[in-house]
Amino acid sequence: MSTVAETVERLVNEAGFDYVGACTTEGFRTRPEVRDMCAANLCQHYDKSWSCPPACGEIEEYEQRMRAFDNCMVVQTVGQMEDAFDFETVKEAAEIQDKRFRELVKHLYEEDFEFMPLGAGTCMLCPECSYPDSPCRFPDKMVVSMEAAGLVVNEICTKANVEYNHGENTISFSGCILY
Ligand code: SF4
């Protein structure tokens, strides 16, 4: 019978990410500065989705939930852009990461152990988020991002031995599974 770590590793590998890495959650900290960056709204999603601040809850709640897990797998998709304005590739890489991550999470829910998924960017499950007019349509499937949970993605990638930046004209989207 497989251990939890073996099962997570197998499912992560089957999901087809470009890069994966593992680390412990020791030293993981949620940081208010990350929420300040969300509030600066460079991504244009602040206060636009149930999965993003301020609707997604306080970072203290996420830190509390994270304490239940000892291990982390980082999963990443990287797009190779033609130039710095190749927004089509950025969008495509984000969608590929989202699809891979959702598939992974779906398979993890079929297993019999607790885990915490943290994705990359805002929830893209619905063509248009129901926020704020009506409740989230799929609260069980909605995935909150690493940033929204207060994690510094660069720090977590480094800890898991995954490059955060793969060089000029590349775009990386990273998520993680805590288990
Ligand atoms: S599942 Fe739909 S309604 Fe809920 S956060 Fe995601 S996009 Fe918004």
Image (spheres, rainbow, N blue to C red):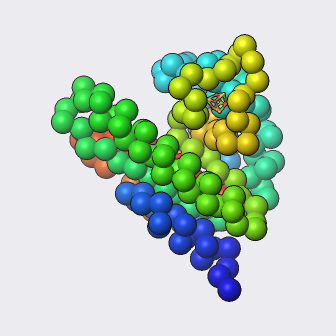
Q: Is residue 7 above or below residue 147?
A: below
Q: Is residue 109 above or below residue 129?
A: below
Residue 162 visible in the snapshot: no
Q: Position of residue 174 (x, y in %)?
A: 48, 47
Q: Position of residue 105 (x, y in %)?
A: 61, 54
Q: Quadrant of the C terminus?
A: bottom right
The residue located at (54%, 33%) in the rendering is 124
Q: Position of residue 11 (x, y in %)?
A: 55, 66
- Along the horizontal axis of the image, is 165 left or right of 14? left
* Quarter holding ligand 1: top right
The residue located at (57%, 44%) in the rendering is 119
- The image quarter containing residue 26 is bottom right
24 or 118, which lies in front?
118
Q: Quadrant of the N terminus?
A: bottom right
Give the farthest residue toward the bottom.
1
8 or 71, which lies in front?
8
- The image quarter containing residue 92 is top left
The residue located at (51%, 19%) in the rendering is 44
